[in-house]
Image: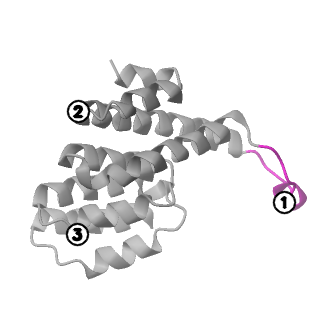
Amino acid sequence: AVMALSYFRRLDIFENILKKNDDSMSAAVFDSIYKMNVEIMKEYRSADEKDYSPEDRFVEKSLNSEEELLLQVKVLLGRAAPRFDHYSDETRVSLINAMLSCNHREGVIYALKGLESRDNNIVRRTLYAVYNNITRLRDPDKLFRSLLAMNILSDGNNRLVVDIFYKYF
């Protein structure tokens, strides 16, 4: 039911659910936010594909509804992030996925926390989250450096790292 809330784009409902501190519900909220972010980014990019003259690119403007909603999502995720260490593995990865999908400024930091985990399942799921969102990130340099320096023990994870670089470049 929480996943269906992404269609309504009402962050106050998500916030109320997160306040209950129910781990499985929090994971569902973060998954729903991810889904909503992907839809917003599709709409935003299709509207952004207009041909602007160089002068139009530097004109100060107010935020449109999609930009305002993404900003509110980032604030909501920023409020949920301090509980990161108290969440279950599934909820952590869902939070990372949601943060990366909206290009949250701390998304890469939390992705690096997931990648530094000793649990191979968390590392693999975090790599999938990075793979799914790599083209949405504005500045993935820190993430790329960390991926190159990682000591990855499984062939599957090694292939996934290569796929991340391939998808981005």
Alpha-carbon span between mark 3 and mark 1: 39 Å
Alpha-carbon span between mark 2 and mark 1: 44 Å
Q: What label does residue 58 carry, if any?
A: 1
- 67 lies left or right of 147: right
- Determine whether 107 is above or below 154 in the image: above
Amino acid of disc 2: Ser
Asked whether 89 falls inside the magenta stretch, the response is no
- Determine whether 150 is above or below 28 in the image: below
Whether label 2 touches label 1, CB < 8 Å = no
What residue range appears in magenta? 50-62
Whether label 2 touches label 3, CB < 8 Å = no
Badge 1 local density, few (<14 within 10 Å), some, or many (20+)? few
Q: What label does residue 116 carry, if any?
A: 3
Whether label 3 touches label 1, CB < 8 Å = no
Find disc 2 in the rendering and name its residue: 24
Q: Measuring 33% from the left and 61% from the top, which residue is drawn there?
A: 111
Any part of residue 101 in sight:
no
Alpha-carbon span between mark 2 and mark 3: 23 Å
Q: Earlier in the sequence, mark 3 or mark 1?
A: 1
Q: Measuring 27% from the left and 82% from the top, which residue is drawn there?
A: 149
Badge 2 local density, few (<14 within 10 Å), some, or many (20+)? few
Which quadrant: the N terminus? top left
